[in-house]
Structure formats: structure tokens, C-alpha cells
Amino acid sequence: MDGDAIGELGAIATAGMAARAIEPGAGEAHAAGHGACLNCGCKLDGAYCPCCGQAAHVHRSLAAFGHDIAHSVLHFEGKIFRTLPLLFFRPGELTRRYVHGERAKFVSPMALFLFSVFTMFAVFSLVGGPVPLASGEEIRQGVAQARVNIAAEQRNLSSQRDRIDREIAAARAANRPTTALEMSRKAFDAKIADTQRSDAFVRLGETGTSALRPNMEELKINTGDPAFDRKLGHLLENPDLALYKLQSSAYKFSWALIPISVPFIWLMFFWKRGLTVYDHAVFATYSISFVTLLVILLSLIRPIGLGAGFALTVLTFVPPVHMFVQLRGAYPIGRFGALWRTVYLVTVATFSSLAFFASLLAIGLLG
């Protein structure tokens, strides 16, 4: 196992420990203790010290140390096994039960969110995402073929424009009207200009590919802001670094998806009594955690041969269905109410995601 893989496995372990740090310990009782607490000396009367909260039984063995690691990383004390089945198949019930007080039984929304986000980026680094990215060689071949196609189209359009030029010359020699022919020529000029812009766009992608970096001199960036042009030029010179910065920014600011989502959820229910912003925050956090875990699952099973089409189909249809089921179970609404709110949430999620990643580009790449 290489150093990168070991580092990413360490990141997954860190994810579990970070989630565990904010996860309440309730619902994980040990055997009752007797005598005095070894930490503060308070009299024991139960599984935990009533004064400082330390477990009554403290073990000094390698097995106990391994248990603590497994417990911190993977939550092997029952909570995760009660939470995940409900999150995947009855998310509305999980949300409702947690909101209404059954919290010791389940992994808290924020702990699950932290664990899933940390793990997702670690898995991306180990095996890639659910949709495989093109290799450098595939990009080169695609760019080369695109330029061949554009050149062929330009030759065809130029040939037709030359034919029209000859027809215009013949019409003028015979004193015939040329208005229609000149309009056709302008139309071909516009099409040729479009192909030139397409070729320039393809060359931009070609120049931004690390494997074709020597062509960077061909690209002249001029947006009117020299400082911005320099940053964009550095970005195109090293797209691998740009991708790393984007991932790092997403890793740091993923929590922002929760406050972005909550106001939109509140708008769907602001006239209903008995619902609080806390309820919506739990709903949003569990929903985002589900999508993140789904992406992790698709990334892990992709190497067995499932294509990008399968992953895209799942990511297109499963989250809306999950939202509908979660809305139906978490809030006192009927099928129609859940249906229109699902359409609304999918629309909001799409635009919010675009805004989120646009912000990441500004902060992580050009900031």
C-alpha cells in the first residue's frame, strides 16, 4: 500500500474520530460499577460516574484499546446499525423520531454528516468518484478529434462561401440582383466565425490539460483585469493543482450546505405551527448525509464494472425519491404536499449546488 492510500485511510479514521467527538455518549451504557470513581473519587452507583461521567469500568488491555479505536471510528456500539437502515429506507421516521427526542438511539445528524463528508473525500482520493474521469490520453485524443472535425467543417463552409462568391460575381457581370446571394454569404461568414470560436474553445481546453502544457504560450487571456488573468493563467497551467484546491475547498466548506438549505426548507412550512428551524436543520443534515453516503457507495462499487450511466441514473432518480419519502415521514403532510415540495427541493438543491461550487471556484481557485 502506497503512502497516499495510507494517508487516505488515516483520513477516514480521522473522520470517525471527528464525528465521535461531537456524538453524545448516551445509549452506550456499560456494566454498573461499585466503589469510587478512579477519576474523581465520587461514589459510583451505575455504569458511569454521577460527578464526572467517566465509565465505571476502566480496562488496561490492548483489546480495550483496540475496542476504543473501533468504537471511535466506526461506532460499533449499535447506533450506526440503527441509524443507517432508517436513513436509507425510512428517512422520515428517523428524522421525526430524532426531532421528537429519541436521540440516544441514533447517530446525531451532525456526527453522521461529518463522518460521511470526511469519508467521501478520502474515498475519492483512493478510488475516484462514482463517474470515472477521462485520462490524459483520452483527453488528448478527444481534443485532437474535435479539432479535426472543426477543420473539416471550416473547409466545407469555406468551399460553399467561395461558390457563392463566384455566383455573386457572375450575377454582377450579368446585371442581375445579388441581394439574396449576399445574405447567404453573410450567413456562411457567421457560421465560419462560429467554428473559429469553437476551435478557440477547444484550444483552451487543450492548453489547460497538463499533458499538453507546452501549448500554454498559444493562449492569450485578456478579461480586462490583469490580476485575474494571471490567476486564471496559473490555473490553466496546472489543472491538477486546481482540482486539488477545489476538493480542499469543498472539504472545508461543505458544512455551508446546511445553512444554505435550511431557509429554503423553512419557506415550505413557515405557515405550519409546531415546526421549528431545528426540525428543518435535522431534515437537511440527514438528507445531505444520505446523498453523500450514496456517492460513497457508488464510488466503491464502480470498480466492479458499473458504468458512468448507472451512477448518473442512480444520482438522478434516487435522491428525489428519498426526499419524497423523508418529507412524507418527517412532516404531517399528504402525498401531494410531499410531491410539490420534492420538486421544489430538487430545483433548489440544483441551483444551490451550482452556487456552492461557483463559490468554491472563487474561494479555492482564484481567491
Image (cartoon, helix red, strand yellow):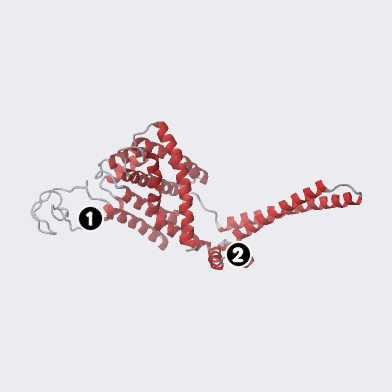
**Quarter of image, res 266:** top left
Nearest the eye: 337 or 110:
337
Count of labels in the image: 2
Look at 55% across and 67% down and name the residue there.
Answer: 230
Q: Where is residue 19 shown, x and y percent of the image?
A: 31, 53
Left or right relative to 162: residue 196: left
- Assign the N terminus to one quadrant of the image: bottom left
Disc 1 on helix, strand or loop? helix
257 over 86 or under it: above or below: below
Q: Where is residue 270 shown, x and y percent of the image?
A: 36, 40
**Quarter of image, res 277:** top left
Marks 2 and 1, how far apart at CA: 63 Å
Disc 2 vs disc 1: Cβ atoms closer than 8 Å? no
Left or right relative to 346: residue 208: right
Q: Where is residue 233 shown, x and y percent of the image?
A: 56, 65
Left or right relative to 328: residue 36: left
104 over 138 or under it: above or below: above
Q: Is residue 2 visible?
A: no
Of the residues under marks 2 and 1, which one precedes in the sequence?
Answer: 1
Nearest the eye: 146 or 183:
183
Could you say which disc has been placed on residue 63 in the image?
A: 1
Q: Of the residues shown, which amino acid type is indicated by label 1? A: Ala
Look at 77% across and 53% down and name the residue there.
Answer: 158
Nearest the eye: 356 or 174:
174
Residue underneath mark 2: 222
